[in-house]
Amino acid sequence: MIQITENRYIVRNDKILSGEPIIKGTRTPVRAIVETWRQGVSPEEIPNLLPHLTLAQVFDALSYYSEHQEEINEYIERNRIPDDLIDPLVRDM
């Protein structure tokens, strides 16, 4: 079941990522955009890294995050790979 949110490009679909907020028409979760932005990538640059997204979708995801930080931060933490499971060659990059 697809659930519309108050944001134009953000939806929830029970069949995609267990209902985690995603960009409409994609499987890209809001958390992926937030994590990219937190790494220092400007919103304008994110569509270059994720070319299936528009700048409007990126800004809408960040807007959603600003209003739902606790929820998205929980998804980020839930999907974080523990440091001891990351190969040292990758971790030290």
Image (spheres, rainbow, N blue to C red):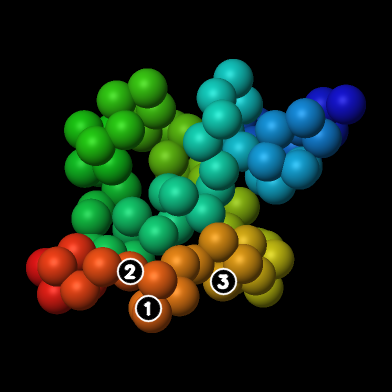
Question: Between disc 3 and disc 1, whose residue precedes?
Answer: 3
Cα separation, mark 3 vs mark 1, equals 12 Å
Check disc 3: other Cα within 10 Å, few if <14, some if 14-19, many if 20+. few
Quadrant in which the N terminus is drawn: top right
* Viewer-nearest of discs 2 and 3: 2
Q: Where residue 91 sits in the image (x, y, percent)?
A: 22, 71
Q: Where residue 89 sits in the image (x, y, percent)?
A: 14, 68
Cα separation, mark 2 vs mark 1, equals 5 Å
* Viewer-nearest of discs 3 and 1: 1
Q: Are marks 2 and 3 in contact (CB under 8 Å)?
A: no
Q: Which residue is mark 2?
A: 86
* Residue ID at (55%, 61%): 79
Dot label at residue 77: 3
* Residue ID at (82%, 27%): 2
Please, what is the three-letter code of the amino acid marked with disc 2? Ile
Judging from the image, what secondary structure is the residue with disc 1 in?
helix
Judging from the image, what secondary structure is the residue with disc 3 in?
helix
Q: Which residue is mark 1?
A: 83
Q: Are marks 3 and 1 in contact (CB under 8 Å)?
A: no
